[in-house]
Amino acid sequence: MDWKLKTKSGNETKKLAMDLAKMLSGGEVICLSGELGSGKTTFVQGLAEGLGITMPIISPTFTIVREYIGRLLLFHVDAYRLSNLSAKDIQRQIGLLDYMERGGVVVIEWADLISDALPPERLEIIFEHTKDGRILNFVPRGEFYKRLVGELFRKGDEKK
Ligand SMILES: Nc1ncnc2c1ncn2[C@@H]1O[C@H](COP(=O)(O)OP(=O)(O)O)[C@@H](O)[C@H]1O
Ligand SMILES: [Mg+2]
């Protein structure tokens, strides 16, 4: 099954992320990839808003991980500068497993650059830049994420 949809504005991307945020219960790993300007940070802003986080989400480029408190903890990772490290060093740097154990939601920008260090079960979202919007390709890895994405798309259909 191909889970993809198109958003025509940053706000549409945010709304989609807010819908996803409401379905999360903590411990999830969401991996975003796609070129600069494709909407990854915009998506994280929607996730944060959906989790009731009021602090502004900024691009974490100079700090690798930022932590926010809302209905759940949100860990915002920017993997851009980690791409030349080994999987082991990446674990040491960002401690993904610790975050998951603390019951937070982990969202990673540029996740494709550190694919060796990612947990096998995760939700990948690949952003494509098109001239009139963005295409978001959802790739759920594992049964839990397949159900999650299935539910997200079903809710989207109901709204139409
Ligand atoms: N459909 C869309 N989805 C997401 N962002 C969009 C969309 N259309 C236009 N934009 C704009 O594109 C930019 C995306 O930037 P950003 O989210 O920072 O990308 P990235 O984190 O992938 O570099 C924002 O200025 C946003 O308002
Ligand atoms: Mg970004």
Image: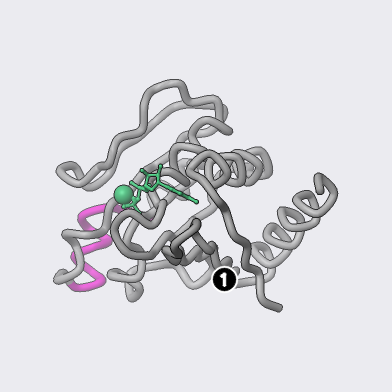
Q: Residue furthest front?
A: 131
Q: Main secondary structure of the magenta part?
A: helix
Q: Residue furthest right?
A: 158
Residue 117 sits in quarter? bottom left
What range is drawn magenta here? 86-96
Residue receiving disc 1: 139
Quadrant of the frame with the N terminus: bottom right
Give percent across and percent down for residue 42: 42, 43
Residue 127 sits in quarter? bottom left
Looking at the image, residue 140 sits to the left or right of residue 45; the answer is right
Q: Residue furthest top?
A: 54
- Which one is in front, 137 or 83? 137
Give percent across and percent down for residue 63: 18, 42
| Identity, as a three-letter code, of the amino acid under mark 1 | Val
Give percent across and percent down for residue 99: 40, 46
Taking the spot 57% from the left edge, 53% from the top edge, the residue there is 7
Taking the spot 25% from the left edge, 42% from the top edge, the residue there is 60
- Which one is in front, 68 or 44? 44
Looking at the image, residue 106 sits to the left or right of residue 113; the answer is right
Looking at the image, residue 53 sits to the left or right of residue 41; the answer is right
Taking the spot 54% from the left edge, 62% from the top edge, the residue there is 136
Taking the spot 53% from the left edge, 63% from the top edge, the residue there is 135
Residue neighbourhood size for the residue with mark 1, other residues' Cα within 10 Å, grouped as few (<14), some (14–19), many (≥20):
some
Above or below — where is 31 with respect to 17?
below
The way the protein has been coloured in the rendering is one colour
